[in-house]
Amino acid sequence: MPMDPVLKRDLQEKAVQVRRLILEAVHRAGAGHIGGPLSMVEIGVALYFKMLRVDPQNPQWPDRDRFVLSKGHSCIALYAILALKGYFPVEEVFTFDAIGSRMQGHPDMTKTPGIDMASGSLGTGASPPLGMALGARRLGKTFHTWVLLGDGEIEEGQVWEMAWAASYYKADNLTAIVDWNKVQQFGFPKDGNLKHRINPLPNVPEKWRAFGWNVLEVDGHDFDALVPAMERAKATKGQPTCIVAHTVKGKGVSFMEGDYNWHAKVPNAEELAKALAELELQRPRA
Ligand SMILES: Cc1ncc(C[n+]2csc(CCOP(=O)(O)OP(=O)(O)O)c2C)c(N)n1
């Protein structure tokens, strides 16, 4: 069934707002990641504005759905989403990375309302959500746990220890999402003989399938594909689901898309203005 057009328009509008906040916050901070946050926007917006059962007025509600941003370096996207959801004032997003701010460069569950797990050392954010899911089962709770991983991140071995354990325990109340933008921190070996070169990780869906997961492959920027996949993931019984989301690093800003140089580069005033002008054109029409 096609998605309610009002909801879809709202999600698309939220995606533009989140991208604006990411760009402005990183510009003002003079630091931060940008390509990875921009690539996860639709995934995060679909989760927080359609899927998750959460209460911004009561961030510690024991029965809330859990979300772990394992690719913690992308947290400026999550802060923007949490602010728009009402966890804290939108203005606070602009304190990103400042000393004493609740908006630290990597998520801190002891500081920021709405953060369920501290993360940022890539790979280590994969196992705690499995613990949350198994804990829910043991306590008889019905909440669902989601974890978002980067494609570079899943080269870390701990991710696959979690993947195997989750399918062994048939953790169907856990969904992993891979933000498969196919770009990590640096360029590729084919680009030349420079110091840092990384081969993109191949066969991502096949890997999760081999570890016993139900796998759904979608366009990670298309709400019409993402939301039904998330609903199917929640409804799948007897095994955990991995949504492999094809995404574009730097999505939404033409001169950032697919360019590893924008992994963690700060836009100057001119670049910011150009990027914001591009985003204006992406607002959904009434
Ligand atoms: C254990 C660990 N090693 C290295 C880093 C530094 N680092 C931060 S982001 C990144 C690249 C991540 O690439 P990917 O997972 O594909 O994320 P995305 O493209 O979504 O930014 C690296 C190497 C880290 N945070 N943790």
Image (spheres, helix red, strand yellow):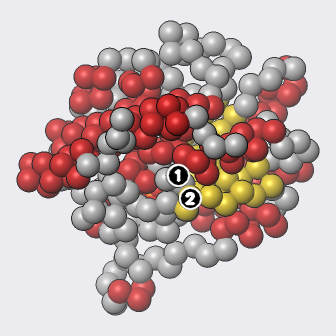
Q: Is residue 4 left or right of residue 102?
A: right
Which is nearer the eye, 52 or 224?
224
Which is nearer the eye, 286 or 209?
286
Does residue 254 appear in the picture of this structure?
Answer: yes
x, y percent for residue 37: 40, 48
Circles 1 and 2: CB distance less than 8 Å? yes
Pointer 1 local density, CA inside 10 Å: few below 14, some 14–19, many at least 20: some
Does residue 174 appear in the picture of this structure?
Answer: no
The residue singled out by tag 1 in the image is 222
x, y percent for residue 39: 43, 54
Q: Secondary structure at mark 2?
A: strand
Residue 283 lies in quadrant: top left
Separation of disc 1 and disc 2 at Cα? Answer: 6 Å
The residue singled out by tag 2 in the image is 219
Residue at the image point whose x is 52% and y is 32% from the top:
7
| Three-letter code for the amino acid on which mark 1 is drawn | Asp
Residue at the image point whose x is 24% and y is 65% from the top:
255
Pointer 2 local density, CA inside 10 Å: few below 14, some 14–19, many at least 20: some
x, y percent for residue 131: 75, 35
Residue at the image point whose x is 49% and y is 68% from the top:
182
Q: Quadrant of the C terminus?
A: top left
